[in-house]
Amino acid sequence: MKMKRKQATLFDCFYKPAPPAVATETALEEPTTTSLTAQHKHNETDVSVTPAPDGSSWPAVWSESQAREFQNRHPWLGWRERKLGCEVCSTTKSTGVLTEKSSGSSENRETALSSLRNKIRRHENSRAHEIAQELTQKCGQDLLGSMVRAVSDTVLAETDAVFRTAYYIAKMNRPFTDHDDLIELQEKNGVNLGTSLHSRYSCTKIVEHVAREMQTKIVNSIVSSSNKLSVLIDEATSASHKSAMIVSVKASIDGATPEFVFLELVELESQTAESIEKALLTCLDTAGFSEEWLQKNWIAFVSDGASVMLGRN
């Protein structure tokens, strides 16, 4: 009756300890601090293995100095219960050549040492061990974070290019329909503009966003420096034939010479003096000029001579 072979485990790998046998003592290729003759005499009198400081034990064929020397040369080398294994492959769940059949118990010391060295060398040069080392190195790196940052940088660069294109259209008073053509032109010239924000509707929203940000920056500069403010308003008619009010302000921005700056186009509910006054104050408050600040720094109001503008008759 055939016995079912026990499946090899991670540390059933290089060497299965054999009882001490009388053999010609041959030094290892690696330098050692303890002679093999002394080690052989120690094995004849006491076959127990001195436990390592970490509580594990190295193969009986090695002395402590040999075990430490091999571990210094091969940092991935580990042992448990007198059996060797690869700590790297153990971490990555890879066994490689570690499942090979262990050395037979009938081998003498010279053969056991040679077999052990060969298995260590073969495992270190194996593809499975190389893959395990690569995986261990990658585990210590922030690969996901690096990938996310790289993708974010690419997306931001694409968005920057689209925003500059939309800003050019607004600054040069070009129609929003030019946005598609400018995007196509730049892509043919090799500029990476991504796949989104290419429509004229996106261009409109981008220009509105940029305008709000610029307005906020200008108002904050005026308010923080407590510069004196003048307000100019005028009536206009929108494209939908609705009454609107153009609001502009004049002030010194960042210490420069005072100049008029367009602030807002406000749609009017009615053309009465009360409605115009309410719309103007609401516009200034929404822009960031508080009532307290206006009482201290608002020094001039400019409009045409219409009765509703002056609040008379």
Image (cartoon, helix red, strand yellow):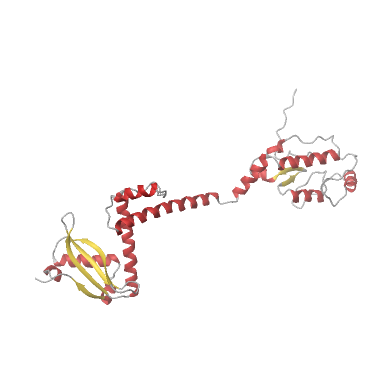
Q: Is residue 302 above or below residue 134?
A: below
Is residue 55 shown to the viewer in this render? no
Does residue 35 appear to the left or right of 190 in the view shown? right
**179 or 238: nearer the viewer:** 179
What residue occupies the far left of the structure in this picture? 313
Task: Please name the residue shown 68% across and 38% down the image.
Answer: 96
The mark tally for this picture is: 0
Q: Which image quadrant for residue 263? A: bottom left
Q: Which image quadrant for residue 81? A: top right
**45 or 284: nearer the viewer:** 284
Task: Please name the residue shown 73% across and 30% down the image.
Answer: 5
State the quadrant of the N terminus: top right
State the quadrant of the C terminus: bottom left
Q: Which image quadrant for residue 297? A: bottom left
Does residue 114 appear to the left or right of 200 in the view shown? right
Task: Please name the residue shown 23% across and 61% down the image.
Answer: 265
The location of residue 33, given as percent across then percent down, is 85, 52
Is residue 124 shown to the viewer in this render? yes
The location of residue 23, given as percent across then percent down, is 90, 39
Task: Please name the residue shown 22% across and 61% down the image.
Answer: 266
What residue occupies the far front of the structure in this picture? 189
The location of residue 183, given as percent across then percent down, is 35, 49
The location of residue 173, given as percent across then percent down, is 27, 57
